[in-house]
Amino acid sequence: MLLLLTLAGCGGSQNTLNPHSHPAADIANLFWVMMAVSFGGLALITGLLVFAWVRRGRRGFGADPDDPHPGERPSWFVVVGMGVVFPLMVVIALFVVGNGVIISSTQAPAASSTAMTVDAIGHQWYWAFRYPGTKAVTAGELHIPVRTRVNLVATTADVIHSFWVPELNRKVDTIPGRQNRILLYANTPGVFRGQCAEYCGLQHAHMGMLVIVQSKAQFRTWLAKQSAPAAAPTTALARHGEQIFLDGPCASCHAIRGTSARGFVGPDLTHLASRTTLAGLTIPNRADYLARWIVDSQHFKPGNQMPDFNLSQRQVHALVAYLEGLK
Amino acid sequence: MWQSRPGVLGWVMTTDHKRIGLLYFWTTLVLFGAGGAEALIIRTQLIQPNQHVVGPSTYDQLFTMHGITMIFFFIIPMTTGAFGNYLLPLMLGARDMAFPRMNALSFWIFLGSGIFIYTSLFLGIAPNAGWFDYVPLANAKFDPGHAIDFYCLGIIFNGISSSLTAANFIVTILKMRAPGMSFNRMPLFCFAFLAASWGLLFALPSLTADTIFLFLDRNVGTHFFDVAKGGSTLLWQHLFWIFGHPEVYILIVPAFGIATEIIPAFTQRRVVAFPLVAVAELLVVFIGFGVWAHHMFATGMPTVTVVFFAAATAVVVIPSTIQVFAWCMTFVTGNARFKTPLLFIAGFIFMFVAGGLTGIMFLAVPFDQQVTDTYFVIAHFHYIIFGAAVFPIFGGMYFWFPKVTGKLYFELPGQISFWLIFLGTNLLFFPMHIVGLEGMPRRNYTYPSGLGWGPENLAETIGSYITTVGIVVLLANLLVSYFRGLPAGPDPWHGATLEWTIPSPPPEYNFAVIPKVSSAYANWDYADREEDRRKLAEGVMVLEQGHEQPVSSPVDGWWAEIVEMPHDSPWPILLAVAMSIVFVLLLLHLWMGFCFALAGILLVLLGWHGEEPQEREA
Amino acid sequence: MADYIAGGVPERLVPRTTEARNAGEAKVLAGRRRGPSVAFWGMAMIVASEVTLFGTFIGTYYYLRFNTPHWPPVGTPEPRVVVPLVMVGILATTSLPMQLAARAARRGGLWAARLFLLWALVIQCGYLVYEIHDYVDQLRRSVPQDNAYSSIYYTLLGADHAHVAIGILLVVWLLWKLARGLTMYRLNAVQVVAFYWHAVNLLTLVVIGVLLSATL
Ligand code: HEA
Ligand code: HEA
Ligand code: CUA
Ligand SMILES: [Cu+2]
């Protein structure tokens, strides 16, 4: 079990110091500068303390050893100079650079000027993505074209979540009743991991997502495929699976476009088989995992909204066959 | 002069600030143990990827209770309740608090609220939406059951206790100073507690209102936080942080106060730039009221708002830097003796600067938005809370141990405990910066391998065990010293303030003769102390008729009045019991019983005020 | 030592509360005291904290208001204007007898203090009874469960009524205490409760003003 879960972490990293876009790079550079200055400040203070330790047991500063305030005057200069003037300068510089320059480079493009808009909708506990203007709906995995300024609109279906893909940009919360926006941009194709960053309940830890950055042509193909309705089942087993899905409990929570399943509690499964992972990056999308997920999702993701089902071995096989065919 | 009642009843009915201080001390120590145990389970769960020590539901309760316990049930009651209660009157030259019975009431309410909220943990239905408890996650829809009701009621209950303490402290500091102690002659410790008390008094109502709204939303069906009906989820966050940010300065300022007592005693030098430091202590709390939204940078507020709060955050840094350099220059220009208490203060300065510098980083808004809700923030505030608010508490335990017990502690184990705690906390919290930058969000009950977070988490967990060993050594040292320590005498450190002029442990009435004060370092004014001894011999300024206490004018410290203080009283604990009943009935929705209990409270209050302490006994 | 004592009076002349056992002695002592009593400072702190609490409620009111297009929302009745204003005006007049009671007590006028308190109490009770009646009446037309507007409306108004009720309990208690003569303790209590009432009245004025601002 431990080993199996371990695999799920693979695919993309989410290191803020490994930026793959200009906003993330700006922030990372800002951090390195701040860190250098901070180490300087910490070294200064530590130096003063060590200095006091070195001259412990000695009193006064050259002047009268009985002076109750040895070195009071020079100390005042230090306190005012280093305690007021110097930090003010540092802080103002940081403020101007950090907030004057970098805020704007990370902000979402105006909706009118943008090449592309994507909606990210936080659910307990997975991300759903919609591509306005098309019918495409996915979950857990977001595809965007490379070197395109994407206007990402983050909303929530229930509680507050936070959309965060560290290697591409800073995060933004999803607040009920609000539409928060952020810029999503990637310099290179690749897979970048993201995760819900605002505590949202039991499975907050398993609310991951992948941003898959593709060349513009690949992306267009992918989007066209996702916009299409689900493929009809081809084998008998799969047809049986579809039957179970539509007649059973599944359809009350899940939607499969092109069938009568219109539920909206769980992720849209229209092109489930085109995903690499399931349930917010918790498990890989493989037949064996899928089968276990259907009967025992609570095992992988305790507390998640999908109940365990009492299905026979055959029924599960049929369901898996059907879902595996949803390319 | 008066004596305390012996036996258990003496403690239950006590109005003596020293006994109340000790009651607070033991209670908060136990609660610290509970909060620490929760932290250790958290750390053990996170020791490596995909662990199963506890499940998500338990984990959520653990970190929520850890945060609540450490903030509301450990640091605040430990600094104000224990240190403030015990030491403030001693430093002011007073014989008691301004309102001794109210002081006892604060303690018993605090105890009641602690038992109240911990009941939920033992029932397995502890608050589980984080210590800042954001809605809508905390609404009845997403969190049915009693968990969040425990949170709301427990916080309100606890807040009453803290508000009473704060009011009591402010009046004590303004009115109960020894004659002659004008503001410029007041020890810095007292400035710190004045600042913290003002902060509490004005910050808590915001939290109280917030939790009242949430309780109503959950139990009555109002719509304060319900977006569909015109409410707002950000309202909760604003009100919480309007309290929450001043709160963090309330946590730190008493630590500043402790530091400014330990430093002069062990450098034998008055604190550099006294007026600046005093003003900075007050200013840090004052400005702290204007920066709350820096906890909400990622909520998508308009850029102007965000930038405004970032600028305010930049300003609040200045009073802190003033103090840091004043302390350091006192170290440098004085004659430092690095005994255990001073070691803790040196460690405190180091940790405070480290944590403060990451705090400054957050005012670069894009950076904050990148690392908020990750372990980088956890690292920031544990450096500044554990390192800067708790280290001085440990230092203060050592420092005032001889005063409270009359015994000296053992120096070598003391220094060992410091180094264990210092190295342990750095091993515990430093890697959190790295793992936060590597993208690990907070409040995750587990994490996948393959993201490179394993080694850091392992180091953190080992660090937490080392820290625990250090704390145990510290407590063991003090415990053994209590039985085996050498007698300390009234003034083992040649301390600066009035508590060192009286015997250890101090008598019930603190000061046999009302002391003369002509500077903020009264114990170093040898002529004044000589005069006190002469007056005691002559019987001048002794005020021995009952429970008498001089009252001073608020600013100049002129002697304005002599008042009679209340004696031991059963009413505070009775009132606290009645209030506990009220809160339990509210929790259980027993509205009729609730009304009866309210009437009971009125009866207790009537009994309380039946005694008029200021009448002379016949 | 003399320079430490208010006005340079000698130590034995510093007022000592234990010396006041009846109205006459209390009066003398109160005359010698400079500045408000410790009890007064305590009450000032409680009032400061309550004012902040009400401030938060009022802040919430406006925060919600500026997030809502129609205030009060369509379908929710607007608050009535004239009657509440008249009522709060009447309540505000009780500050006068309360202050007079405090002054009388300070001068040792036990009977005068009782009468002034009684005067105030009658008006205060009348106000509260009417307001409770009105509150219940309003609940027939809208309830706090309607929307965020009515939630904050009833909470704010209810909190203010509770505040008035506490003040009334204090006045009743004072009268009961004064029935058995005047001591230093009771004198302090009269002054403190008078101060509390000023705060109650001021807050009621502000609260009613805020609630009525919805009709603007
Ligand atoms: C004791 C408690 C305490 C204290 C004193 C502070 C002090 C500061 N804090 Fe911290 N903070 C917390 C406790 C505290 N904090 C907690 C608990 C949280 C998280 C709550 C939660 O989310 O659960 C938090 C979170 C927090 C945030 C939100 C982060 C986020 O969630 O995104 C921010 C943002 O601005 C912040 C900033 C600051 C700043 C600027 C200071 C400043 O006051 C620091 C000033 C000190 C110094 C600057 C040190 C002195 C330095 C020198 C002398 C060197 C020279 C200096 C220069 C060159 C500038 N803090
Ligand atoms: C005062 C504040 C304070 C203190 C001192 C601490 C101390 C510690 N904290 Fe905590 N912490 C918070 C305040 C504090 N914390 C807050 C506010 C949060 C946020 C919660 C939230 O997100 O909602 C948090 C969150 C937090 C997390 C993040 C959890 C998460 O997001 O998933 C972690 C993880 O490692 C952690 C660890 C620790 C550890 C190991 C200690 C250790 O230093 C503890 C060491 C102490 C002991 C081990 C106790 C020893 C005592 C005794 C032995 C006494 C026994 C005596 C008797 C019984 C008489 N803390
Ligand atoms: Cu969604 Cu955390
Ligand atoms: Cu803050």
Image: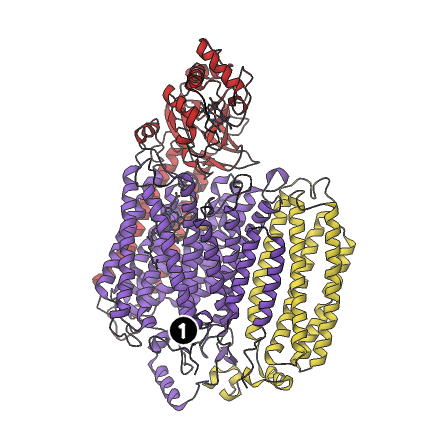
Chain colours: A red, B purple, C yellow
Q: Residue furthest bottom?
A: B538
Q: Is mark 1 within 8 Å of ligand 2?
A: no
Image mark 1: chain? B
Residue toward you, A254 or A14: A254
- Element at badge 1? helix
- Name the residue that disc number 1 marks: B7
> Is B265 or B610 nearer to us in this picture?
B610
Image quadrant holding the C terminus of chain B, namely bottom right
Quadrant housing the N terminus of chain B: bottom left
**Residue C200 placement (x, y as % from top left):** 66, 63
Give the vertical position of B136 relative to C85 (above or below): above
The image shows residue A240 at horizontal and vertical percentages of: 48, 13
User: In the rendered structure, which amino acid carries the disc numbered 1?
Assistant: Gly
Decide if residue B577 is in sight here: yes
Residue C35 percent across, percent down from the top left: 57, 76
Q: Would residue B280 be seen by someone viewing this image from the given angle?
A: no
Name the side, left or right, on which B67 lies relative to C138: left
Mark 1: few/some/many CA within 10 Å (<14, 14-19, 20+): few
Seen at 41% across and 67% down, the residue is: B21
